[in-house]
Image: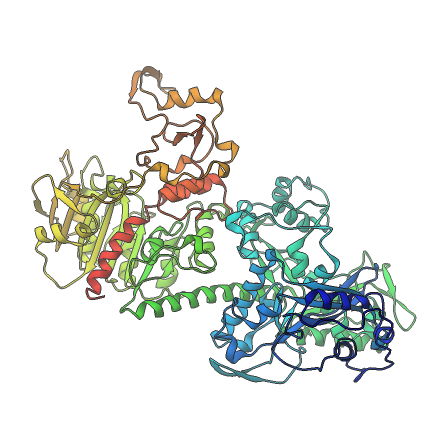
Amino acid sequence: MHVEQTTYDASSVESILRYARQLEGTTLRDACEIDEVANPRKRRGSFGNALEKYFFHYDINNSPDADFREAETELKSTPLRKKKNGEFSAKERLVISKINYMTVVDETWETSSLQKKLHKILLVAYEYDPETNPVDYLIKVVDLWGIPASDVPVFKHDWDTVVEKVRHGRAHELSGSDTLYLEAATKGATGRDRTKQPYSTIPAKPRSWAIKPSYMTVTLNGLLDMQSIRRNQAERETDLLVLIQKRFEPYIGMTEDELAEACGYDVAGRRKPKSLCALITKQLLGIDVRYKIAEFEKAGIKTKTIRLQRNGVPRESVSFPTFSYFDVAEQPFEESDFYGYLRQKYLFVIYREETEERGVFRLAQVLFWQMPDRDLLEAKRCYEEMQRRINAGHAEQSVTSRENRCCHVRPHGRNKADTLPTPYGTQETKKCFWINARYIVEEIDRVERELTAATAQAVRERIDRSNVAGQVIRIAELFAGVGGFRLGLEGYDNPEHPEFALPAAGPFVTVWANQWEPQGSPRRQFAARCYEARFGKGSVVNEDIARVLDEYEAGRIDIPDVDMVVGGFPCQDYSVARPLSQASGIEGKKGVLWWEIYRFLQLKGRPRYVLLENVDRLLKSPASQRGRDFAIILSCLSTLGYVVEWRVVNGADYGLPQKRRRVYIYAEQTNEAWDLEERLSNGVMAEAFPMEFVGAVKEFELLADPYENSEHFGAGLKVSPFELAGVMQGGHVATAKVAAAYSGERTVLGDVLVPDEEVPESYYVEDDKLEAWRYLKGRKSEPRVNKKTGFEYRYSEGAMAFPDALDAPARTILTNEGGGSASRTKHIIQTSDGRYRRLVPDELDQLQGFPKGWTDTGMTDGHRAFCMGNALIVGIPHRIGEVIARRLHPNA
């Protein structure tokens, strides 16, 4: 034996490694003095078996324990393939252990046998050569490896993805495309063996846990020319796709030229480099252009630009590099470059053509794609047909897209003169394999459906969990924003985001949501994208609600049945154009969102509960008919059979950290006749927000029809009859002035401030800008002139706090809270070192009761502030929901 150390201590990792490293630069023939191995045709298996038997001297076994049990170390050998440029890559995935479908469902990542095996692996990597006897493979690397701490979240996420499919009875649908670093691997695309799975009668392919070749290549070659994507503390365990989507988010709606310019590349009017998509991706992910993206290299991810035309079909098919006619003629599919391309994962950067401007494509989304295992057979047919034609002397005959569902072959040279030699001595135009354009559309749709299905499955599971305690309350959230009502009622319980955990108010589950920002451009839909980022793909319908209801009414889409409708809607002109008595019913002004709420309630069979939020001005508007708009809303709800409570709530009055007065309208379907005064004192709103009366209860009748209220209610009144609290049943109203009666804990602005080190320097106000802030917030009485009319007048306004007090609740957050310019309404605070600064988005999130970082999904700081200015205080619907739940289940 040509090694100096002839024995090792099987209980010592250090001893095993010293012994094993004698193999580097040698072969099994030299190290073990053997001339042949068992089953030389099974080259990888035979090398590994010989390594165990003749070098490490232990019996070959299939034990679930580690190969070196006492040292808790696994032995793995893996082949390397030498590329044309002289570099080495992993020839295949590294199989770790078989997956037992029946037992893996009872494991967690932390307790799994796989996690223990991946803790310490002795890797022996050798140079593979199909013409060489396995005993003569040159051993290139011997090293001890374990999952780096930075990669554990990805391995855990991959493990969870696979196991969750098994738990849902979908082991037969597992695919290598599901995951990034780890995969559930079969022994081949055509394997016909099947085995049982626990939660389905459909047999599944036997699979093993394996590390993908791309990851092994990086592991064996090192990270010298790579950079990792920068993550902040809150992003340490964020899913890679979610992180990428967050980085792309601020640029949604840009053209490729605009995006390139934002990244520092001037391509307008020039021929775009083929690598532009990769360069842009690097820039957005914070990677120096000189380096590769470490996460992409480990997962084998390549970037591809997809431009979808108005009809949804890509403008072009997806191409791969030119192939060699000799290689295709000789190589089996599984050893071909084409197979390698298809086994890669791709980041599709998707642009969609504008509906109004032909030829203009704007960034719409990014998503991962890898060809599913089931489609590799179809791709193999394309490859083998092209192979047959080349070997038959007909390299000029390409496989067309009509012949194969997934792929085709066509020229890929500069012109007809750009040729390559064929095996039979002729020259033929350069060609490559392409993925069919329509197949790409189908695959994008499939990926989106799977993401949406995962969200729907999560909703079903929440319904099942809630039903354990009794009847679930299914919610439709209208004008959802970033999900304030949903958070307040349903809470948040996502293992991937433990930092966002919030308790549920009761058995509430949101089953449908709608959010649409007027103007309709993709760049304006940042709130909907935040909602999806937090609640899952497909969790919100991002279309104009009027159009959605038109589609539902026409039977073209479905909206699930719900028990409760919630939403915050703007204060608009609610006037009625047609009375209820006319055949087609009430008609309100087009574009006024109240009428879409009313329509939704009608179309969905008058759900049991309604909870709405609006500015308190709703009780008084308009100035010409005080209280008319609110009377119309009450009258509409009454016509649908609802009884109503309302209450103006200031969050600060109930211990919340912001002074924000909003009217909350609670309605329910009931056959119970209310004693209005008693309900005013002991109803849902009074229990949620204890109060004391500061005036007498007033009672009056609404007019019988919403149209009549629109025409006549409040005419001649200087003050609205609707007070801060009230109830209504059958058109009869009881209302009174009230004051908060609260003595619990209180939070203030200072309680939500982030540490100084988390505040960007741009949020601090420079000394020479402070005077502008002081002027805008100060008391004024000064002459001014109307620029249009020249009219002179005296403008007066009182002083506002400067800086804002940290020991008191914040003022109301408005949508213009973002941006660095001086403003009367923005908050400004003084820090402990005497400097002045604006509030950062994480603080605005918390002032509204959202978890810190809730809106940090990639949108700009200005957009984050806008979202919080439009949001509600999460704690308010939470308190209302708790009361509803208690009354629904009094013994729970």
Q: Nearer the viewer, residue 50 or 167?
A: 50
In the picture, which quadrant includes the N terminus?
bottom right
Look at 43% across and 68% down and name the residue there.
457
**In the current view of this chain or complex, which residue is farthest to the right?**
425
Identify whether 553 is placed above or below 761: below
Q: Position of residue 874 (x, y in %)?
A: 33, 49
Is residue 567 rendered to the left or right of residue 150? left
| Quarter occupied by residue 669 | bottom left
Is residue 759 rendered to the left or right of residue 51? left
Q: Nearer the viewer, residue 780 or 14?
A: 14
Look at 34% across and 21% down and name the residue there.
778
Q: Position of residue 653 (x, y in %)?
A: 24, 40
Q: Position of residue 526 (x, y in %)?
A: 47, 47
Q: Position of residue 721 (x, y in %)?
A: 13, 40
Q: Is residue 355 visible?
A: no
Instruction: Count the labels in the image.
Output: 0
Q: Nearer the viewer, residue 716 or 221?
A: 221
Q: Is residue 36 visible?
A: yes
